Image (tube, rainbow, N blue to C red):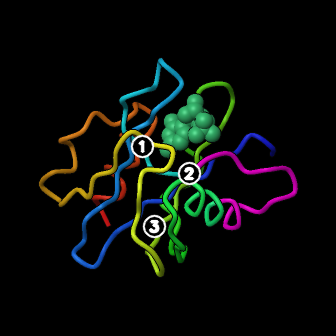
Amino acid sequence: MDKVVVGAAIVDGNGRLLAAQRADPPELAGGWEFPGGKVDPGEDDHTALIRECKEELGVLVAVRQQVGGDWPLAGGYVLRVWLAEIVEGEPEAREHLDLRWLAGHELYDVPWLPADLPIVRAVQGR
Ligand code: DCM
């Protein structure tokens, strides 16, 4: 399986979830997602997730439980999401337009990408 995108459901000590606003491509720009990205050939999922969080947010994360299994994406990709905690650094939007920490009552205050929305519900349930 070489069409895997990994995403991080980063939760802070107050139970808030980190959402990231996409900058590109134009059809997805402005939508909100779990930070992450494509797994490189030969790379394992956890390594890719840690790498992407470093590149996109400038933070080191510890990967916790997986949220569901393979969530479908366009183009034959699947999205795999893990709960994660920041162990080093403060997140900054290095590749996104914006970042927001969403409390439980704010989870749907941003327009999530359609692919990510059911995963937000799954995260909420935990
Ligand atoms: N994608 C998504 N939700 C995410 C991460 C990615 O829907 N949390 C989608 C957007 C792109 C594709 O996966 O169509 C590849 O993502 P990227 O461009 O970030 O590698």
Q: Which quadrant of the structure image shows residue 112?
A: top left
Q: Is residue 72 visible?
A: no
Residue 73, given in percent of the width and then of the height, sits at: 57, 33
Residue in the picture at 46% in, 35% down: 115
Q: Is mark 2 within 8 Å of ligand 1?
A: yes
For label 1, the residue is 33
Q: Secondary structure at mark 1?
A: strand
Tell me which image quadrant ligand 1 sits in: top right
Between discs 2 and 3, the one toward the N terminus: 2
Q: Position of residue 106 (x, y in %)?
A: 15, 51
Q: Amino acid at mark 2?
A: Gly
Mark 2 or 3: the one toward you: 2
Q: With respect to residue 61, does 68 lie above or below?
A: above
Q: CA distance from mark 2 to mark 1?
A: 9 Å
On the image, numbered disc 3 is attached to which residue?
Answer: 83
Q: Indicate the position of residue 41 as horizontal and vertical percent values.
A: 85, 50
- Residue 71 visible in rendering: yes
Kindly identify the residue that appears in the image at 35 percent across and 50 percent down. 19
- Range of the magenta residues? 37-48
24 with respect to 33 (left or right): right
Q: Is mark 1 within 8 Å of ligand 1?
A: yes
- Disc 3, ligand 1: is the CB inside 8 Å? no
